[in-house]
Amino acid sequence: MVLIQSLIINFLVIFLFLQIGNFFSNKFKLEEYYEKILFGFSIFTLLNFFFYFVFYFSVKKIIFIWIITLVCIFFSNIFYSRKINFIKFGLSVSKFIIPITIIYILIPIFFGEQFYVFRGNHWDLFSYLSIASLFNDITFNNILSNEIPRFYLHFENIEKISISRPITSFLLGVFLNLKNIDIYLLVYLFKLFFVILTSMSIYLFFNKINISRLKSFFFSLIFTLSFWIIYIFEIDALSHLVSMPIFILIISEMINIDNNIKSKNNLFITYFAIINSALFLIYPEIFIISSLIVSICLIVGFLKNKLFFKDYIFFLIKSSIIFIIITAFAYKTNYQFIYEQSLFVLTQNKDW
């Protein structure tokens, strides 16, 4: 039963991301199937941030908006004779969803609920769960007004934690609306979904460096069972896990960045700024690492193509402006958080 539930959830959510990505694919000239899915996830993340943290919509209202959106996209495709190739979709995503889901679900089925309730980092697990439940119950405006129900005040410092890079907790809160599934199992399924999304981004990365599709698929499966991804999964570092697909997508886009810069591809600049904005909102700490990698790639590319100096400057300025416009609304939740984290690192003696 758990296996079937997980498969249904994974197929439906990825289908939603694909439809969002498809909606923008013509404008941004996205051709890769998994690129559309990952871009759809980025757009989904940004819109959810604005819905809940800027416009103060409730989680229930946001879920309703997405259901209506999915239905509208579905019927608009039929109305405008845009065929949804369910067979192609099923074959493309099932090769990731089915094997990874089976491997990860067999473990809790075999070991029982003790396996997925108490893992290596109960502090982070209950932190994310408490905040996700809080978001489900009240709007962000209530939190800013300090109108938090007494029930949640058992969690120390929840007023501050709930506004510290909170989009991952929000996404988990959306998952928690699947009421017929145990809440701790839902967290496990939530983590599993992003392992699958990460495998797609790894597959896309290997494809972009001209490795055959069969090898790319094989490597993507190996990565989902490797030390690093399992380590992140085990310690309940949910923001890190949720950020991995977009982080790898950004690294993938750096492979052909020079060609896009030299061709003055404005659409790519906007697309690149959007996925970077999504990464920043999810996990600003890893965004700093990503920015360092992007900066090194741009410097190397510039040294090889010095005649295109103006194009590189133009790319940096325009992408930065778009990024700042999108993320400016995250001043309290992300910019202030990363500033305080930096101060903490510089002034404390504790070596975590």
Image (tube, rainbow, N blue to C red):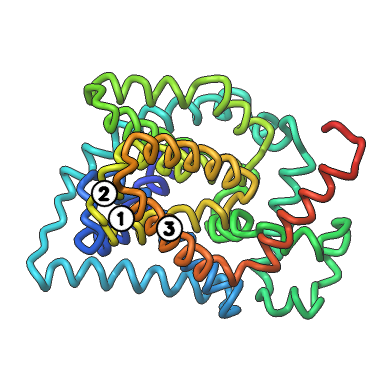
Q: Which residue is denoted by mark 3 in the rendering?
A: 273
Tell me the kind of residue under disc 1.
Phe
User: Can the viewer see residue 40?
Assistant: no
Q: Of circles 2 and 1, which is in front?
A: 2
Rendered location of residue 343, percent (x, y): 82, 50
Q: Earlier in the sequence, mark 2 or mark 1?
A: 2
Q: In this orientation, which residue lies closer to the viewer: 140 or 164?
A: 164
Query: From what the image shows, is residue 200 above or below residue 152?
Result: above
> The disc labelled 2 sits on which kind of residue?
Lys
The answer to whether 87 appears left or right of 283 in the picture is left
Q: Earlier in the sequence, mark 1 or mark 3?
A: 1
Looking at this view, is 153 or 292 the one in front?
Answer: 292
- Whole-angstrom CA distance, mark 2 to mark 3, is 17 Å
From the image, tell me which residue sits under label 2: 262
Question: Quadrant of the rendered structure where residue 314 is?
Answer: bottom left
Per the image, the residue denoted by label 1 is 268
| Placement of the C terminus among the 4 image quadrants | top right
| In this view, the mark in front (2 or 3) | 2
| Front residue of this view, candidates 184 and 219 | 219
- Residue pictured at 75% horizontal, 50% vertical: 127
Q: Looking at the image, which residue sits at the far left?
A: 81
Residue type (three-letter) at the residue carrying disc 3: Ala
Q: Label 1 to label 3, Cα distance in Å?
A: 8 Å
